[in-house]
Amino acid sequence: MRCLSFSLWTRLRRCTSGIAATEFAVLLPVLVVMFFGLVEASDAMTANRKVAISANTLADLAAQSEQLYEADLDDLFDGVKAIIEPNDSSGMQLTLVSVILDEDDNPIVHWSRDSTGATPYTAGNNYTKLSDDDVVSSLGSLIVVEMTYVYNPGLTSHVLETPITFNRQSIRWPRLSNRVQLCDASDNCTS
C-alpha cells in the first residue's frame, strides 16, 4: 500500500503541465490590481503636483503686481485652471488673499477674492490660516493663495466612489511695492 501512495505522489510531483496555468490564474488578479493601482497612484500624484504648481503660480503672479484689477484676477484664475487640465477643474476652489498687520501686529485681511468673484473674507477681519504669523511684515502685505482641488480617480472611481481632496496654501511677499492693491474697473483701489 505504501508503494502505491509513494508512486502516486511521485507521479503528481513530476506532472507539471497544469501548474503554470494554475499559478497564472491565481496571480493574474493580483497583478491586474497592482497595475491599475500604480496607474491610479501615478495619476493622483500628478494631480497633486499640478495643484502645488497652480497655487505657487497664482501667488507668484499676484505678487509681481503693484495693482490687480478684478478682470486681471479672472484671467489669473482662468490660467490656473488651465494648469490643471486635462483633469476636470470643476472641483477646484481658489482664493487669493492679501494679509496685512493691524496696529496690534495681528494678521488681518487687506482684501480677498475667490474664483467665483466673491469676497470670502471681509477686509479688516482677523486672518487665522497662517501657520506662522511672523511671516507678515509691518512694512507690507503678504499674498496668500488657498487652493482646494477635488480629484476624482478615473479607473477606481467606480470601485472606491470617494474623491481625493488636495488642499494647498502658497504665500509670497509683493515684489514691486509694499502692498498689492485690488482695484475695480473705476480705478478705486484698496488702501
Image (tube, rainbow, N blue to C red):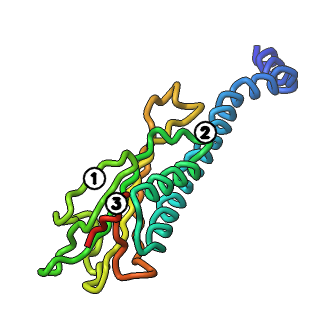
Mark 2 vs 3, N-terminal side: 2
- Measuring from the top left, give residue 137's x and y in whole percent: 29, 83
- Whole-angstrom CA distance, mark 3 to mark 1, is 18 Å
Callout 1, which amino acid? Answer: Thr
Sequence-first disc among 3 and 1: 1
Element class at badge 3 = loop
Residue at the location (41% across, 61% down)?
69
Using the numbered discs, state the Cα–Cα distance from disc 2 to disc 1 in whole angstroms: 40 Å
Tell whether 81 sits left or right of 179. right
Residue 142, image x and y in percent?
34, 74
- Left or right of 67: which side holds 57? right
Which residue type carries mark 3? Ser
Front position in the image: 43 or 142: 142
- The residue under label 2 is 37
Residue carrying label 1? 119
Compared to 170, does 14 lie above or below?
A: above
Report the Cα–Cα distance between label 2 and label 3: 53 Å
Residue at position x 17%, y 80% from top?
105
Identify the residue shown where x is 17% and y is 75%: 106
Q: Would you place residue 159 above or below residue 106 in this image?
A: above
Disc 2 + disc 3, Cβ < 8 Å: no
User: x, y percentage for residue 132?
Assistant: 28, 74
Q: Is residue 42 left or right of residue 147?
A: right
Residue nearest the viewer, comparing 138 with 151: 138
| Helix, strand or loop for disc 1 | loop
Name of the residue lying farthest toward the front: 186
Q: Which residue is mark 3?
A: 186
Q: Residues within 10 Å of mark 2 (few under 14, many from 20)?
A: some
Look at the numbered disc 2 and give the secondary structure of its residue.
Answer: helix
Amino acid type of the residue that numbered disc 2 sits on in the rendered structure: Gly
Query: Image quadrant of residue 15?
Result: top right
